[in-house]
Image (cartoon, helix red, strand yellow):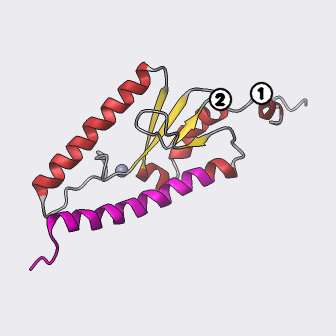
Amino acid sequence: VDTFTAQQRSEIMRRVRSAGNRSTELSILGSLRGLGIRGWKVRPAHLPGTPDIFFPRSKTVVFLDGCFWHKCPKCFRLPSSNKTYWKSKIARNKKRDRKTSRVLRLLGFRVLRLWEHEIRQGTAIRRLLPLAVKNQSRRSRFQRPSISGRG
Ligand SMILES: [Zn+2]
């Protein structure tokens, strides 16, 4: 016998999933810091959809999408109970994601969405790095070692 109501179960799921999201978020932010990338902000409340990372100079926003909540084509599995509930909830999330990206692009932002599994596997930083470097300030660009090796 199920001792939780649908709402309670949903709340438990939400907590479990967001704990997972938090650790992936910390890992990508840790990678940026570790690489010495500066000039970004976390969750700017003034932007639509509150992106997870914001690079003001290159006008780029990054979303760290949980594979469950954002229906990753690779990882998403519908929970075995409350299928109807989850189906419509995830569909609503997906619709909101598309709308948010569209609005941000219309405002002139470059939008990058990274999957939770890409962060866990360490491939996300490869997609993020070129944009992060482009965003670097003039000063920190000068601090980078010369590629030609003559410097
Ligand atoms: Zn995934």
Quadrant in which the C terminus appears: top right
Horizontally, is 135 left or right of 77 in the view?
right
Magenta-drawn stretch contains 140: no
Q: Which residue occupies the extreme right position in the image? A: 151
In the foreground, 20 or 120: 20
x, y percent for residue 46: 49, 34
Q: Is residue 127 above or below residue 17?
A: above
Horizontally, is 113 left or right of 72 in the view?
right
Horizontally, is 107 left or right of 94 in the view?
right
x, y percent for residue 3: 14, 78
x, y percent for residue 56: 60, 30
Residue under circle 1? 138
Q: Is residue 97 above or below residue 79?
A: above
User: What are the residue bounds of the magenta stretch?
Assistant: 1-30
Magenta-drawn stretch contains 28: yes
Which residue is depicted at the point 51% across and 45% down?
124
Residue under circle 2? 134
Q: Residues within 10 Å of mark 2 (few under 14, many from 20)?
A: some
